[in-house]
Image: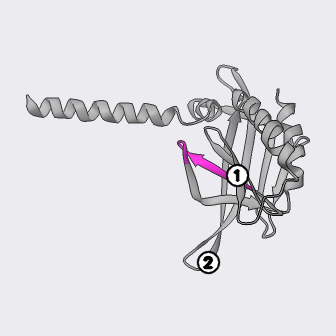
């Protein structure tokens, strides 16, 4: 009887853990992963691209995914990251796709309008810095200011956990943040 209770407890813990992980992904990822046949329409006319000096790139663009069996549709912002990292002394490429759901897009617009754009030209005092962080289910967008330096860092998440080994950052592309805002507004 004791063994049955322990086995039941362990199975319950596994089920709860799996459900919690599922809730950490975007509705778009769940929609695409749950469909047997999916069509994803991308609008390449409306993109915000950030490039680093070493050839890395992050692109934001609107998409509409369709479940071809049920004809259900979902709109979101797709985020494609093509980054480089070093592994055992060799440079490797890393590509990943994440999504921002519509409700997260609204929050991201507010974040950029209220905290990033007004501070895009700000400077800090010596030995001080400021970081503005937006977290969604699948991305983390950081805007960092230190003295005259401004930096964007974009991290993609796996089940809500930030992947600190594979991320994108740039200082030269900060002036493109208004383009990102335009892309986000296109999906509304």
The quadrant in which residue 77 appears is top right
Badge 2 is on which residue? Answer: 90
At x 57%, y 50%, the residue is 162
Query: What residue occupies the far bottom of the structure in this picture?
Result: 89
- Give residue 17's position: percent from left, percent from top: 39, 36
The answer to whether residue 42 of the structure is visible from this angle is: no
Q: Is residue 17 magenta?
A: no
Q: The magenta stretch spans which residues?
A: 152-161
Q: Measure how far apart labels 1 and 2 are at the Cα level.
A: 31 Å
At x 78%, y 33%, the residue is 110
Query: What residue occupies the far front of the structure in this picture?
Result: 125
| Label 2 residue SS | strand
- Give residue 125's position: percent from left, percent from top: 77, 61
Task: Using a 10 Å C-alpha cutoff, classify the residue at mark 2 as few (fewer than 14 neighbours), some (14 to 19) or many (20 or more).
Answer: few
Magenta stretch secondary structure, dominant: strand
Quarter containing the N terminus: top left
Relative height, residue 67 to residue 169 (above, below)? above
- Give residue 41's position: percent from left, percent from top: 79, 35
| Horizontal arrangement in the rendering, residue 63 relative to residue 23 (left or right) | right
Quarter containing the C terminus: top right
- Give residue 181's position: percent from left, percent from top: 85, 39
Badge 1 is on which residue? Answer: 131
Which of discs 1 and 2 lies nearer the camera? The answer is 1
At x 83%, y 37%, the residue is 113
């Amino acid at each position: 009887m004791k063994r049955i209770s322990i086995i039941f407890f362990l199975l319950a813990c596994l089920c709860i853990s799996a459900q919690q992980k599922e809730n950490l992904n975007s509705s778009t990822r769940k929609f695409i992963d749950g469909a047997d046949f999916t069509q994803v329409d991308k609008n390449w006319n409306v993109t915000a691209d950030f490039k680093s000096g070493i050839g890395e790139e992050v692109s934001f663009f609107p998409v509409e995914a369709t479940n071809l069996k049920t004809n259900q549709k979902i709109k979101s912002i797709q985020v494609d990251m093509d980054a480089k990292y070093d592994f055992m002394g060799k440079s490797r490429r890393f590509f990943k796709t994440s999504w921002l759901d519509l409700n997260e897009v609204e929050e991201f617009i507010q974040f950029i309008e209220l905290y990033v754009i007004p501070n895009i030209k700000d400077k800090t005092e010596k030995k001080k810095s400021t970081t503005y962080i937006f977290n969604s289910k699948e991305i983390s967008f950081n805007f960092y200011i230190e003295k005259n330096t401004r930096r964007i860092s974009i991290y993609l998440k796996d089940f809500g956990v930030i992947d600190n080994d594979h991320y994108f950052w740039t200082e030269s592309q900060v002036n493109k943040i208004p383009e990102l805002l335009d892309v986000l507004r296109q999906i509304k």
